[in-house]
Image: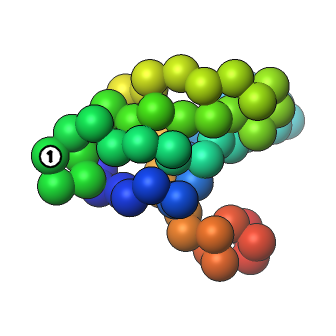
Amino acid sequence: MRATAGNWLVVESNHRGAPSRRGLIVEVHGTDGAPPYLVRWYDTDAETLFFPGPDTHVLTTEQLHRH
């Protein structure tokens, strides 16, 4: 996975009908856009260091508005 600061992470729920979780990537701590990412979560405004799993994908701001 590769991302830049300003991209969004979307973590899909493993439960049917449950909402996905979204967060703004504030900082990229890996080399060449690799994780971990400092993420500010949309639902709580909390910032956490995040290592994405297979249920996570990266979107640009433009893609997020279409998603």
* Badge 1: residue crowd in 10 Å (few <14, some 14–19, many ≥20): few
Q: Point out residue 36 in the picture as x, y percentages from the top left corner.
A: 32, 32
Residue drawn at point x = 54 percent, y = 35 percent: 39
Q: Point out residue 19 in the picture as x, y percentages from the top left corner.
A: 81, 37
Figure colour scheme: rainbow
Q: So how many labels did they put on this image?
A: 1
Q: Is residue 45 above or below residue 67?
A: above
Residue drawn at point x = 51 percent, y = 46 percent: 25
Q: Which residue is mark 1?
A: 31
Residue drawn at point x = 45 percent, y = 55 percent: 5
Residue drawn at point x = 21 percent, y = 39 percent: 30
Horizontal arrangement in the rendering, residue 28 relative to residue 33 (left or right): right
Farthest residue in the left direction?
A: 31
Horizontal arrangement in the rendering, residue 66 relative to residue 17 (left or right): left
Q: Relative to the observer, which residue lies in front, 30 or 20?
A: 30
- SS state under label 1: helix
Residue 47 visible, this angle: yes
Q: Relative to the observer, which residue lies in front, 55 or 39?
A: 39
Q: Is residue 49 above or below residue 25?
A: above
Residue 52 visible, this angle: no
Q: Is residue 45 above or below residue 57?
A: above
Question: Which amino acid does the dot numbered 1 rest on?
Answer: Thr
Q: Relative to the observer, which residue lies in front, 51 or 45?
A: 45
Q: To which quarter of the image does residue 49 belong?
A: top left
Where is the C terminus found, in terms of image quarters?
A: bottom right
Q: To which quarter of the image does residue 4 belong?
A: bottom left
Q: To which quarter of the image does residue 34 belong?
A: top left
Q: Point out residue 62 in the picture as x, y percentages from the top left corner.
A: 65, 78
